Image (tube, rainbow, N blue to C red):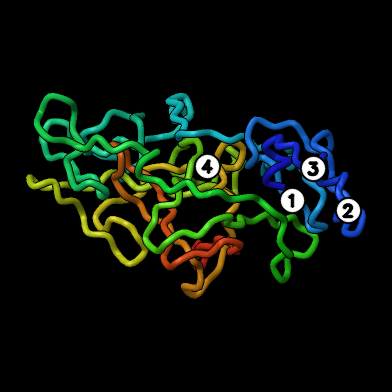
Amino acid sequence: MFALSRNVRYHESYNESTLAAVIGHLSSSEDVPSVSHPHELYLAMDGQTIERSYFTAANGSQYPMQTITSNIYNPSNFHKHPRPASWPEEWLYPHAPNDPIRDPYSANYPLCTHCGLETRAKGFGRRCVCRTHTVFRRPLVEIIQYPCYPGSEGSLNRGVRLLEDVPKGEILDEYLGEYIPLPTPSVMQAFEDMTYTFLYHGPPITCEDGEGSEMDEDGEWGDVGDICGLKGGERGNWTRFLNHMDGGQGNCQFETQVVAGKVRILIVANRDLRMGDELCVDYGPEYFEA
């Protein structure tokens, strides 16, 4: 799967070997659907078939899942929906939700949780210069089909298998998608993504020293409300395939942090991870009610 999805043609040599005659031949790369990124494919339950991933909207329509490298902010998504009460008072509406500076006139800039420096513009002293490619681990992973959850037999359950060891505390990646208004019944009906939509927190309220709001045990800023949604079904990255494991048994967790100049939903390893592990998170008690 890993090689074929990346057009590594090792199978041609393997299929000519005596091992292939005993175990079986590998599929050729011609059998692999054409995609722009390997994470748009998944390995089926038979361990051989490689399929294209599709997003099924609430109305039943299917769209090819696309991989993006940063969140999409389209102001027109917000124009038909009212400004929520939780929207930062100092911001216009709409405004890029991942802006880490809540009040641009206060000069109270939030600290980057990675480097500890202020997230501010150039020319004003020492500041955060972190970049996601140096902060995020972005481990080798592949998307595979796992058995269905009890009670959901017949549905397609894709998950994420880790292909390298990762130590506890590493930031694996960022949950990516497209910003939409704060999810309400009318918003969810309009955007039709009932499965991959996250609530998105506003930026932290910061003091003069740059220290922000304290996080609660769920990784949320206690005095900051949700300001919009982030939907990752049609356009997102591999993190949308993370499966649920309740009771704190997940080996990863979601954390909202200011990192590399943006407010981001991060996936963090909460224990040492081993090659072959399925990556799972606890989505909360309402996960199966959505």
View extreme (front): residue? 18
Residues at marks 1 and 2, CA–CA distance in whole angstroms = 25 Å
From the viewer's side, name the closer residue of 75 and 246.
246
148 lies left or right of 248 = right
Asked whether residue 289 appears in the rendered view, the answer is: no
Measured from the top left, where is residue 259 in percent x and y? 30, 43
Nearer to us of marks 4 and 1 is: 1
100 lies left or right of 176 = left
Asked whether residue 171 appears in the rendered view, the answer is: yes
Q: At x 50% / y 60%, what residue is drawn?
A: 165
Q: Are marks 1 and 2 in contact (CB under 8 Å)?
A: no
Q: Secondary structure at mark 2?
A: helix
Residues at marks 2 and 4, CA–CA distance in whole angstroms = 48 Å
The amino acid on which the numbered mark 2 sits, given as a three-letter code, is Thr
The amino acid on which the numbered mark 3 sits, given as a three-letter code, is His
Give the residue number, with chain letter if any, for mark 2. Answer: 18
- The part of the image, by quadrant, that contains residue 104 is top left
Crowd band around label 2 with a 10 angstrom C-alpha radius: few (<14), some (14–19), many (20+): few
Instruction: Mark 4 or mark 1: name the one nearer the start of the chain.
Output: 1
Give the residue number, with chain letter if any, for mark 1. Answer: 43
What mark, if any, has residue 11 been given in the picture?
A: 3
Nearer to us of marks 2 and 4 is: 2
Q: Secondary structure at mark 3?
A: helix
Q: Are marks 3 and 1 in contact (CB under 8 Å)?
A: no
Q: Secondary structure at mark 1?
A: strand
Nearer to us of marks 3 and 1 is: 3
Give the residue number, with chain letter if any, for mark 4. Answer: 231
Q: Are marks 3 and 4 in contact (CB under 8 Å)?
A: no
Measured from the top left, where is residue 232 in percent x and y? 55, 42
Residues at marks 3 and 2, CA–CA distance in whole angstroms = 13 Å
